[in-house]
Image (cartoon, helix red, strand yellow):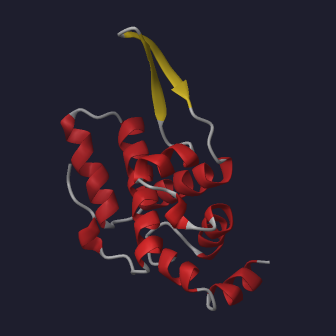
Amino acid sequence: MSSRVSRYSKTFKELKVLKTLPGIGDIQAAKIVSQVVDPHRFETKYKYYSYCGLVRHTRISADRSYGTAKIWGNRVLKCVYKMAGHSVLNGTSQLRLYYDDLRPRGISHDNAYNAVCRKIAAISLSLWKHNKRYDERMIRAI
């Protein structure tokens, strides 16, 4: 099956663009395209994070906080970005350096890992919307 995905990925420009991102291969790019279909339906990257299930929402009423609510989102996309984040942390790309920059600031491993996953999601959405290839300079420190 992966050979078919590989063959078809050469004909779809969306897949070519997404595969330039570290941690995203043929199958992961195909999953993103099949789940999202049109990247322009998301006004902001934050709405995309929510759709992917990569955020938690604070529950506030009458100026009182009642904790956070887990957003389930799209389980396929959440898995894609979590796997991409894991792959990136095993490499030496700018995304790994972004993670390494967050850790000395007192950010826990889990929160830094989630930040990397969200960064990958934001970049993939931007690449697809603007039909541009990934460039390491897209990664900026906080």
**Location of residue 41 by image quarter:** bottom right
Q: Position of residue 54 (x, y in %)?
A: 50, 43
Report the residue at 27% width, 55% height from top.
98
The vertical placement of 6 against 30, above or below, is below
Residue located 24% across and 71% down the image:
137
Q: Residue at the spot x=39%, y=64% of the render?
A: 123
Q: Is residue 121 above or below residue 107?
A: below
Q: Position of residue 24 (x, y in %)?
A: 52, 69
Measured as percent of width and height from the top left, residue 28 is found at 61, 67
Q: Quadrant of the N terminus?
A: bottom right
Nearer to the camera, 100 or 126: 126
Quadrant of the rendered structure where residue 2 is? bottom right
Residue 121 rendering spot, x and y as whole percentages: 46, 57
Quarter of the image holding residue 72?
A: top right
Can residue 109 be seen in this snapshot? yes
Of residues 28 and 55, the one nearer the viewer is: 55
Residue occupying the point 42% across, 37% down: 110
Q: Is residue 123 left or right of residue 138?
A: right
Q: Say above or below: 124 vs 13.
A: above
Relative to 117, residue 54 above or below: above
Q: How many marks do you count on the picture?
A: 0
In screen coordinates, is 83 left or right of 88? right
Is residue 90 visible to the viewer in this orientation of the structure? no
Q: Nearer the viewer, residue 96 or 47?
A: 47
